Image (spheres, rainbow, N blue to C red):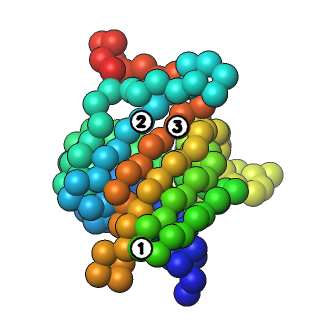
Amino acid sequence: MSDEREVQEVLARYVRATDRRDGRAQGALFTDDAVVQIHTKEGPDRYEPFGEPLIGGAAVQYAVDNFMEPHPEGGSSHHTTSDHIIEVDGDRAHLNAQFIVFRVRARRRPEAGWPAGALGAQGTVEPIESGYYDTDLRRIDGEWKIVRHDVLMDMPMALPGGLT
């Protein structure tokens, strides 16, 4: 597999771990000193840091396990990435990709079965977030790890109680 494809696969594993709320799998993609920072778009081509950065894979795992809202019954999220720009220079790489996050809500199948006339997927899929992942990686012992991960959100964000 090419270096570029291996780097792209790290991001694929990252978004799948996010959708599964699997902190262990996501944290394992980062170095112990990796920096993860969310940024919100505050104007044309202007981003501001949002909150404090996470430092290291253990912090990423903790954040996923303790701060990400669990999916409700029948619910999930689905992250998609596209337009990957990957530059590899020896054991260092840079990846930039667009992302969209979808909220998925499946309807519960009635005990008596679907009503007459029901057809196709039963539920809703709604886009809820978009932006760019801007990520630096380093090959360590033959494995690509994230050393810097900036999440560039297309919209401002808010947290309960006005926390940022």
What's the mark number on residue 38? 2
Instruction: Point out residue 34 in the picture as x, y percentages from the top left corner.
Output: 29, 53
Q: Quadrant of the C terminus?
A: top left
Q: Quadrant of the N terminus?
A: bottom right
Mark 2 and mark 3 in contact? Answer it, CB < 8 Å.
no
Q: Nearer the viewer, mark 1 or mark 3?
A: 1
What's the mark number on residue 76? none
Residue type at mark 2 is Ile
Vertical comparison of 125 with 44: above or below: below
Residue type at mark 1 is Asp
Residue with the mark numbered 3: 152
- Give the mark, 2 or 3, whose residue is nearer the N terminus: 2
Mark 3: secondary structure: strand
Q: Residue at x 42, y 19 (%)?
A: 158
* Mark 2–mark 3 distance (CA, rounded to whole Å): 6 Å
Residue type at mark 3 is Leu
